[in-house]
Amino acid sequence: MRQRTIASLAGKLPVLARSVGRDLLWKARDLGTAAIPAGPPPTTDEQDDYRQKGWALLRGAVPEAEIDLLKERIARFRARAGGGVDEHGNGMRIGLLHAEERQSLEVALNPRARAFLAWAFGGEPVLFGSLTFDIGSEQEAHIDAAFFYTRPDDVMAGCWTALEDIHPESGPLFYIEGSHLWPRQLAADALAEDPALAARVRAHAASGAGHDLALSNAVYLAYIALLHRRIAERGAVKTPALIRKGDIFIWHGWLVHGGLPRADRTRSRRSMVAHFIRHDAQFWDQHAFFLHGDDLTQARCTRFAYRGAPRGRYIKYHQAVTFPGSDGHFKA
């Protein structure tokens, strides 16, 4: 059985965390000019939803046959790769399945989604990574931009594809509509409320040492605590994304979202999340964001090697990541 448990905050960047303790700088290897998405451009309503609400729903974007084939490939991968299951036999999440399973890559690089993101980003979207779920994550409210920080800061997004109709008791994805328009919350905002933690971060930055996972996690916890206070102060409502098989729910990188509790733990919530960034964006991982978030000029941005596929480009990884236990690590 192959199991690779890799430390990462909130499970967002399982492979990048391998590089803890050294600068992560991959030489960019561009495989040609930017690819033009082949899908139809977004409708006016889809554009308005994304601008004003922070999300857009592409109904029926993935044909049923593609979904069914992907589910077969997921089951085949789980059979050979191992990984944990819950008490009802549903598998734990898989990171970067698209690195090994072609059908996962095909669904992640959906033409309609890429065409939408090309409009939203003002440039070519490149697939950053993927997470595949059998069950709801129950993940706390969070902001993806803290884990995929880019400049410009609005050229990252998540695409959640439903591999079955999502039931309200299965622990669906939730979002806080319009939260992408709130003032940007940076690590410095959390550190301003904790002078002792801020002093530790300044000392770490001055030392020139590599990533300190424990310190990064401490800043993350302070950041999430501040975010949750702001949610409560605004009386913000968590809206479930009750979408249907083949729908793609796209959210802005600064939209607050997470996973609702699994009210019925016998129910699955089969889905795949793909994260995209613009091909020419500067990028910093979560450790840079939390440890140098007040001055990212002090942290080297990450560059990537790209691979090409008929439907678009994606960042090069070699292997998927399986997890042996509960997704409870998502909770702070």
Image (cartoon, rainbow, N blue to C red):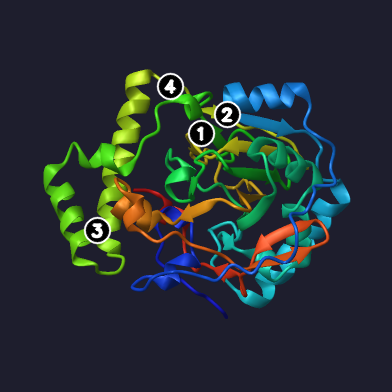
Specify few, some or many for label 3: CA neighbours under 10 Å numbering under 14, 14-19, or 20 or more.
some
Whole-angstrom CA distance, mark 3 to mark 1, is: 25 Å
Please state which amino acid type lies under the numbered disc 3.
Answer: Leu
Please state which amino acid type lies under the numbered disc 4.
Answer: Ala
Q: Is residue 245 visible?
A: no
> Could you tell me residue 117's position as x and y percent?
69, 41
Which residue bears the numbered disc 3? 215
Query: Of the numbered discs in the image, which one, if any, rests on residue 108?
Result: none
Please state which amino acid type lies under the numbered disc 1.
Answer: Leu
Callout 3: SS: helix
> Could you tell me residue 241's position as x and y percent?
62, 32
Which one is in front, 275 or 164?
Answer: 275
**On screen, residue 325 above or below 192:** below
Callout 4: SS: loop
Left or right of 259? Residue 117 is: right
Which residue bears the numbered disc 4? 236
Query: Of the numbered discs in the image, which one, if any, rests on residue 255?
Result: 1
Whole-angstrom CA distance, mark 4 to mark 1, is: 12 Å
Query: Of the numbered discs in the image, which one, if any, rests on residue 54?
Result: 2
Whole-angstrom CA distance, mark 2 to mark 4, is: 14 Å
Name the residue: 68% across, 73% down. Answer: 79
> Could you tell me residue 222's position as x and y percent?
26, 43
